[in-house]
Image (tube, helix red, strand yellow):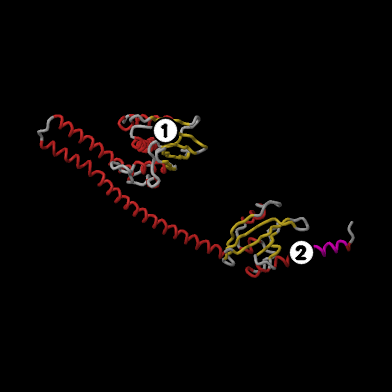
């Protein structure tokens, strides 16, 4: 058994440590108090006492004016060796907001109490509220400016489309009017009449195609996603290109797809339209001779499509402009084919680029992400 002097020294050591701890807690700016298992306040530091008074010995919920049900969370919601808990606490006595941290504390007698640390966050909450309000105001202003900019862009695009359409339809419309006037005069021999009707048919078809291109660019469609086999897609493109023998000539079209390429989610009609636009540009450049290749491979969640031709290529001066609307190197082109192709690819979350070596080859690279639907 320990001697009486030994017990006194032990008590003195405990009291010294307790006084030292009390001095440390009293020197802190945060409010600190300890609650025992009986829900009574065992200690309050000077910072907290200066704000709410001395509540030592009183029930915690009674002194602070809280619902007694909250005591269950503090006393039983935290294990003896569990992690501390955090929550915001509005103290009616001070009309301030605190961040309350509660953690278990073990006394020298083996009893477990709860240490509460109150950090005043009132000003921080006010600042957060002001920042949030300013952020919402800023977001509203940005949205308003973005909407105005979008409207201006749409009006500018509408004007550009209208001007381009007026320019493009003038020639075929003039030919149609001339043909109609000749028919009205009458007296033409059958061969000449057939020539005039052929002219009317070609120019009407040309006019319809131009208007369709302008409408496709002016009003993009939302993709309708389906699982699409790439080999089947390529074969459909090759079949459609082969129907125009005047354009195809002797060009050799080859299709290759990496083995194991899975069906890819896309709007097959739109992607087919984009590929056709690029391939028709290539065939027009090849002038009935050469080769056109459609290749596909995949890496993870990305599908890569390459369209290559060995035609005259695209000059470095023209290459940066080929996807711009109404830019065309041909006198009879609308300059919308590649612009529409880019719109379609980007509406699928993809990307399209072009590289070219004059008099050697031109390559269009399309990447399409795998989107689960």
Which residue shows up at 27% across the image and 49% down it? 163
Q: Is residue 16 magenta?
A: yes
Q: Is residue 204 or residue 317 the one in the foreground?
A: 317
Disc with the residue nearer the chain's start (2 vs 1): 2
Question: To which residue does mark 2 refer?
Answer: 18
Which numbered mark, 2 or 1, is in the foreground of this view?
1
Tell me the magenta residue range.
6-19
Question: To which residue does mark 1 refer?
Answer: 293
CA gap between label 2 and label 1 equals 86 Å
Which residue shows up at 65% across the image and 69% down it? 53
Residue 47 position (above or below residue 205): below
Q: Is residue 172 or residue 158 the one in the foreground?
A: 172
**x%, y% of residue 89?**
59, 60
Q: In terms of secondary structure, where does tag 2 sit?
A: helix
Q: Is residue 181 left or right of residue 246?
A: left
Q: Is residue 359 or residue 172 the one in the foreground?
A: 359
**x%, y% of residue 110?**
77, 55
* Predominant secondary structure, magenta span: helix
């Amino acid at each position: 058994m320990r001697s009486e002097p030994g017990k006194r020294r032990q008590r003195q050591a405990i009291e010294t440590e307790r006084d030292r701890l009390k001095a440390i807690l009293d020197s802190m700016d945060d409010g600190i108090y300890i609650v025992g298992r009986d829900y009574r306040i065992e200690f309050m530091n000077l910072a907290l006492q200066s704000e709410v008074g001395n509540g030592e010995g009183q029930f915690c919920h009674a002194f602070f004016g809280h619902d007694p049900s909250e005591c269950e969370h503090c006393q039983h919601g935290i294990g003896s060796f569990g992690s501390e808990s955090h929550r915001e606490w509005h103290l009616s006595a001070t009309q301030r907001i605190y961040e309350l941290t509660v953690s278990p504390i073990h006394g020298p007698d083996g009893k477990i109490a709860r240490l509460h640390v109150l950090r005043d966050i009132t000003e921080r909450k006010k600042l957060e509220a002001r920042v949030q309000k300013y952020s919402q105001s800023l977001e509203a202003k940005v949205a308003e400016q973005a909407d105005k900019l979008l409207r201006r862009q749409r009006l500018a695009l509408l004007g550009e489309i209208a001007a381009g359409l007026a320019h493009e339809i003038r020639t075929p419309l003039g030919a149609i009017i001339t043909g109609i006037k000749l028919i009205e005069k009458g007296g033409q021999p059958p061969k000449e009449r057939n020539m005039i009707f052929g002219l009317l048919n070609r120019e009407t078809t040309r006019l319809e195609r131009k208007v369709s291109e302008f409408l496709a660019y002016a009003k993009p469609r939302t993709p309708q996603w389906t699982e699409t086999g790439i080999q089947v897609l390529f074969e459909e493109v090759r079949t459609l290109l082969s129907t125009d023998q005047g354009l195809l000539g002797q060009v050799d079209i080859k299709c290759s797809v990496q083995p194991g390429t899975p069906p890819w989610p896309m709007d097959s009609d739109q992607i087919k339209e984009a590929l056709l636009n690029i391939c028709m540009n290539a065939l027009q450049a090849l002038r009935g001779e050469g080769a056109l290749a459609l290749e596909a491979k995949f890496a993870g969640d990305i599908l890569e499509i390459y369209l290559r031709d060995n035609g005259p290529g695209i000059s470095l001066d023209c290459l940066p402009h080929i996807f711009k609307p109404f830019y065309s190197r041909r006198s009879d082109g609308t300059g919308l084919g590649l612009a529409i192709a880019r719109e379609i690819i980007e509406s699928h979350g993809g990307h399209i680029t072009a590289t070219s070596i004059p008099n050697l080859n031109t390559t269009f690279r399309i990447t399409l992400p795998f989107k689960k639907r």
